[in-house]
Amino acid sequence: MTLAQMEVFLKVAQTGSFTKAGEELGLSQSAVSHALAGLESELGFLLIHRSRAGIQVTPNGERMLGYIRQILRATEQMKQEAAQLTGLQTGTVRVGTFPSVSTKWLPPILNQFQSRYPEIEVKLHEGGYDEVEKQIRTGAVDLGFIPVSKEQTDYDMEMLKNDCLVLLLPAGYPLHLHPSPAIEQIAAEPFILPKKGCDLHIKKLFREKNVQPNIRFEMENDEAIVAMVRAGLGISILPEMTLPLDMTGVHRVLMGEEIYRTIGIATTSRDSLSPAAKKFWETVTAWVKENGKNT
């Protein structure tokens, strides 16, 4: 079996399509099929189940994917180590990220990183909190940004910032007269609950006070939540980093310095990161230390 065959199988599994895998790898569909067939022949079992509904990785294929990711990662690390020995900085870094980090942090971080290491390619994989954690755990990314919790023990992690939660109220809403409204007061108002990730922190606030919020709507898009608050359809709570630039017509009340989500950068093993990934880790931590308070 060859590394090229492994790369083809991994790309087919990621894209769910022979055609898309070929496009991303610069191969014809027949070349993709041939490479996959060769790998299946070498292993002695099917990796992909083909049907009219599409393609699906077989249970045996899922087991092989873990090994293949390790092999390809080790190969990439070897290439980067060799490049370092010759005085070059090359390679690829795969980064898991969620929307607020992608919007507020990554543009200046990537600009700085690429100016310093122009030969290193950065590939971004955006998703929700759970999706990024899965990507880190399975090796689909080298490192990723995730909220930090006490339950997380499977990662090497560095905490970057405490992102305060902010209560959002329509302009002129009576509750804004309270400098720090109680959770019980908030629970009595029509509430717009953010979905996917932030909802865990917000539900915890209500659960700790043993109260149920009056949920009127559940929304995924942060700008849509702000727009609905502006229209007087309810109040909401969002982390400060998720807020859009235009907050016209919306009153913001800090929930308290001790009420926040903690954002960190994580990997399965920092010692096993490739040289390029280590450079990206160092760039992120240095940039957030210098600029994080203002973002």
Image (tube, rainbow, N blue to C red):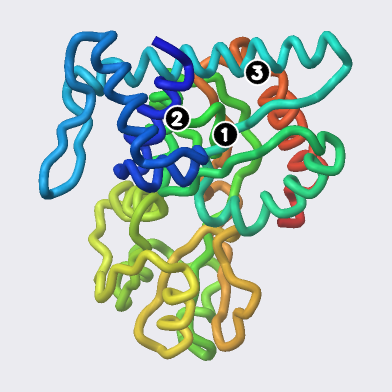
Which mark is on residue 34? none
Task: Report the residue at 68% width, 37% height from top.
Answer: 121
Count of labels shown? 3
Q: Residues within 10 Å of mark 2 (few under 14, many from 20)?
A: many
In the picture, measured across the screen, residue 150 lies left or right of residue 253, that is left
Q: CA distance from mark 2 to mark 3?
A: 14 Å
| Numbered disc 3: secondary structure | loop
Asked whether the beta carbons under mark 3 and mark 1 sit within 8 Å of each other, the answer is no
Task: Report the residue at 75% width, 26% height from top.
Answer: 90
Q: Is residue 187 above or below residue 114?
A: below
Task: Report the residue at 24% width, 21% height from top.
Answer: 61
Residue 212: where, in percent of width, then height? 23, 61
Residue that badge 1 annotates: 94
Residue 142: where, in percent of width, then height? 55, 27
Q: In terms of depth relative to the viewer, which is nearer, 197 or 138? A: 138
Q: Earlier in the sequence, mark 3 or mark 1?
A: 1
Which mark is on residue 140? 2
Q: Earlier in the sequence, mark 2 or mark 1?
A: 1
In the picture, measured across the screen, residue 12 lies left or right of residue 89, that is left
Q: CA distance from mark 2 to mark 1?
A: 8 Å
Q: In terms of depth relative to the viewer, which is nearer, 145 or 175? A: 145
At label 2, which amino acid type do we have? Ala
Q: Is residue 60 above or below residue 243?
A: above
At label 1, which amino acid type do we have? Arg
Residue 153: where, in percent of width, then height? 43, 19
| Numbered disc 2: secondary structure | loop
